[in-house]
Image: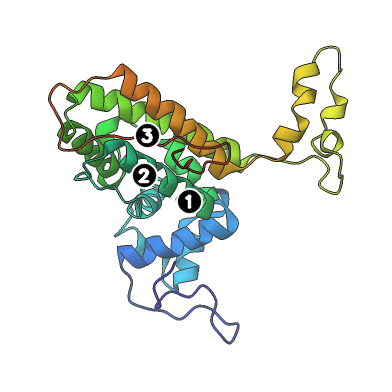
């Protein structure tokens, strides 16, 4: 959301009003442009026009487009809440995962900046804002009694799941949305039945894809596996309980 001082279009249809320029205002405006038009439409000139400033004035806050995009990624990641003091590390990681998914769905055009762009940047050269969630999660896990090495493995496993999930969810495309038959709706009827009998048979399951429930199931599998695989080197301040969940991601009540 843009600060009140940022407006991409003036009420009278003219150019945006010139306001005091700051890094926060510039990044908020850049995020709105990317949300609306995509990364490929972002340029320093386009951003300057939206802010009502000369393009050269933006370089005080971002020396190039790459730095600008890093700043946009930081802006989004700054919204990701991580509580390193939570005594239940698994519950906290589940909360982080849910929040990350919501951010990805709210800013789908920013997802490449969060998922693929960091892979081309050495860890120490990434924006500090992009590293703070990592540091907070490492703190959470080491306070729970895990070694720093194991904490890093757990972090990587979590975000490996998250990145794959959000990319998959954002690209869930329907071939023929007006079709009522799941096989036709997904276009699976084009697959030879002799070669892909199982995939075709999953048409109903694939057509009823629920991103939130799918994430919960993935987290149940991941967190159960992590708990079984990694042993705290010392007792943590709390206990970890992974709730049993139904196929829709809802916790089952004890019998």
Question: 255 or 85: which is nearer to us?
Answer: 255
Asked whether the viewer can see residue 61, the reply is: yes
Residue to which mark 1 is pinned: 102
Kind of element beneath mark 3: loop
Q: Is residue 16 above or below residue 213?
A: below
Q: CA distance from mark 2 to mark 1?
A: 10 Å
What x and y, as percent, mark residue 171?
64, 39
Residue furthest top as drawn: 194
Q: How was the colour assigned to the protein in this rendering?
A: rainbow
Can I make out residue 119 in this image? no
Q: Residues within 10 Å of mark 1 (few under 14, many from 20)?
A: some
Q: Secondary structure at mark 1?
A: helix
Q: Residue at image x 45%, y 74%?
A: 52
Camera-near label (3 vs 2) is 3
- Return the disc, 3 or 2, that comes first in the chain's sequence: 2
Residue 35, percent from left and from top: 53, 57
Residue that sits furthest to the left in the current view: 234
Q: Quadrant of the N terminus?
A: bottom left
Which label belongs to residue 96? 2
């Amino acid at each position: 959301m843009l600060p009140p001082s940022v407006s991409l279009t003036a009420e009278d249809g003219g150019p945006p009003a010139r306001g005091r320029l700051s890094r926060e205002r510039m990044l908020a405006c850049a995020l709105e442009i990317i949300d609306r038009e995509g990364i490929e439409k972002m340029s320093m000139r386009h951003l300057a026009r939206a802010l009502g400033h000369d393009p050269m004035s933006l370089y005080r806050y971002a020396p190039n487009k790459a730095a600008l995009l890093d700043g946009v990624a930081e802006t989004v990641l700054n919204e990701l809440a991580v509580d390193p003091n939570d005594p239940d590390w698994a519950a906290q990681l589940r909360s982080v995962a849910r929040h990350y998914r919501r951010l990805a769905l709210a800013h789908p055009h920013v997802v490449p900046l969060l998922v693929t762009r960091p892979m081309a940047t050495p860890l120490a050269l990434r924006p500090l804002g992009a590293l703070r969630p990592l540091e907070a999660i490492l703190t959470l896990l080491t306070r729970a009694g895990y070694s720093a090495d194991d904490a890093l493995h757990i972090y990587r496993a979590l975000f490996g799941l998250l990145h794959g999930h959000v990319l998959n969810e954002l690209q869930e495309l329907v071939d023929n949305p007006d079709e009522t038959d799941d096989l036709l709706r997904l276009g699976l009827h084009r697959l030879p039945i002799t070669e892909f009998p199982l995939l075709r048979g999953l048409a109903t399951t694939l057509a009823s894809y629920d991103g939130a429930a799918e994430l919960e199931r993935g987290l149940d599998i991941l967190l159960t596996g992590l708990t079984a695989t990694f042993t705290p080197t010392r007792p943590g301040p709390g206990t970890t309980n992974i709730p049993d969940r139904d196929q829709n991601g809802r916790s089952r009540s004890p019998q």
